[in-house]
């Protein structure tokens, strides 16, 4: 039986249900293969997706790391991506940071460790949304938007965008014969350390949704919070891990040129955690805009429900880097074929 059909939009769901996807008659891997029977060849796909690559201005607006005159540093416009956006007039001392969760201003010592141990962070891990002039209850506990946090953590945490050292940048490489520099999707899980956000797990998938990199990463600095609820990773999971951020950077620099298309959802956070400056990126949070406009972005889970008729990031066990990266790739495949 041959399935050379246009598997986009609602027709994708109809065909997959006809094939038995809804009752477990075929595996998710086979579904993925069938979905890509109609995929473009590499060169055509690359040219089609170039239309959605963020401009330099879009990268700067969304907080992507951009080159600094010092080779190993980056410049990041943080006004739309940190708690500073809600307190624009606040001036911080050199030893002060704003907690990314509860917005408390806290002090750190010379090694980045919070000084006060009797000042825990009380926060909501879910979201409260702005709807028709009012805020909805938090998704984590159903409490009102002005309620005290439902979760307590020992430490205040901050991504610390003042720490912009250790960045590397993808470089120019010879043009392939078909003009296809490669199309990949990338997703990371991060933890919070004394020096800010650091990558714990990174997955890269090809345009065929096959993994080309999937590894845990040993944090460089002392960890304040493994963010296990979302990362699915605990201290025990990393006990035997020896792969460092530098190892991952070397792999990515070897694999990608500066013209390779990298796809992700709010990919700016992943690139900051990877300490990677890259010029050719597609952000599904920008391609599929929020109804209220930037800097708001729709959740990846929502995009998959709306455009792919699929549920991801189900409760329990944390997010899957591979699942999120594949979702981003399939969203852009859908976009490329539906236009």
Image: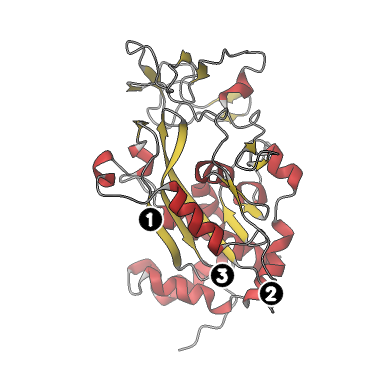
Q: Position of residue 10 (x, y in %)?
A: 56, 65
**Residue lying at 69% horizontally and 79% vertically, measured from the top left:** 177
Q: Position of residue 22 (x, y in %)?
A: 38, 67
Q: Secondary structure at mark 1?
A: strand
Q: Secondary structure at mark 3?
A: helix
> Which mark sits nearer the N-terminus, 3 or 1?
3
Badge 1: how crowded within 10 Å, few (<14), some, or many (20+)?
some
Q: Position of residue 38 (x, y in %)?
A: 58, 78
Report the front residue among 326 and 316.
326
Q: Are marks 2 and 3 in contact (CB under 8 Å)?
A: no
Of badges 3 and 1, nearer the viewer stands 1
Report the front residue among 282 and 72.
72
Of badges 2 and 3, nearer the viewer stands 2
Q: Are marks 3 and 1 in contact (CB under 8 Å)?
A: no
Mark 3 = which residue? 11
**Residue lying at 65% horizontally and 58% vertically, measured from the top left:** 171
Q: Position of residue 93 (x, y in %)?
A: 57, 12
Q: Secondary structure at mark 2?
A: helix
> Which mark sits nearer the N-terminus, 1 or 2?
2
Image: 87 above or below 265: above
Report the front residue among 211 and 312.
211
Q: Give the Cα separation between the discs numbered 2 and 3.
A: 23 Å
Dividing the picture into quadrants, the one containing residue 43 is bottom right
Image: 152 above or below 60: above
Q: Give the Cα separation between the discs numbered 3 and 1.
A: 35 Å
> Which quadrant would the N terminus be assigned to in this image?
bottom left
Mark 2 = which residue? 44
Badge 2: how crowded within 10 Å, few (<14), some, or many (20+)?
few
Q: Give the Cα separation between the discs numbered 1 and 2.
A: 30 Å
**Residue lying at 38% horizontally and 68% vertically, measured from the top left:** 28
Image: 336 above or below 92: below
Mark 1 = which residue? 215
């Amino acid at each position: 039986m041959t399935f050379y059909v246009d598997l986009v939009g609602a027709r994708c769901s109809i065909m997959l249900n006809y094939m038995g996807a809804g009752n477990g008659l075929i595996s998710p891997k086979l579904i993925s293969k069938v979905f890509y029977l109609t995929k473009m060849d590499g060169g055509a796909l690359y040219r089609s997706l170039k239309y959605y690559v963020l401009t330099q201005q879009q990268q700067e607006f969304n907080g992507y790391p951009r080159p600094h005159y010092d080779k190993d540093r980056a410049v990041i416009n943080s006004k739309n991506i940190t708690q500073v956006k809600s307190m624009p007039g606040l001036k911080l001392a050199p030893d002060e940071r704003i907690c990314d969760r509860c917005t408390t201003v806290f002090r750190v010592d010379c090694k980045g460790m919070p000084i006060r141990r009797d000042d825990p962070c009380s926060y909501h891990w879910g979201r409260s949304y702005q709807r028709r002039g009012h805020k909805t209850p938090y998704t984590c506990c159903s409490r009102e938007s002005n309620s005290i946090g439902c979760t307590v953590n020992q430490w205040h945490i901050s991504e610390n965008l003042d720490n912009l050292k250790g960045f590397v940048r993808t470089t120019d490489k010879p043009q392939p014969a078909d003009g296809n520099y490669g199309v990949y999707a990338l997703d990371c899980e991060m933890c919070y350390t004394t020096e800010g956000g650091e990558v714990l797990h990174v997955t890269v998938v090809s345009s065929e949704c096959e993994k080309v990199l999937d590894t845990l990463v040993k944090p460089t600095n002392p960890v304040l919070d493994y963010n296990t609820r979302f990362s699915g990773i605990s201290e025990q999971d990393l006990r035997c891990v020896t792969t460092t951020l530098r190892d991952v950077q070397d792999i990515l620099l070897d694999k990608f040129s500066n013209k390779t298309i990298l796809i992700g959802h709010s990919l700016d956070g992943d690139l900051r955690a990877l300490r990677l400056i890259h010029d050719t990126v597609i952000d599904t949070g920008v391609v599929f805009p929020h109804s209220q406009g930037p800097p708001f972005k729709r959740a990846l889970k929502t995009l998959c429900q709306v455009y792919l008729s699929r549920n991801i990031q189900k409760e329990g066990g944390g997010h899957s880097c591979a699942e999120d990266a594949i979702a981003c790739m399939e969203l852009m495949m859908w976009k490329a074929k539906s236009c």
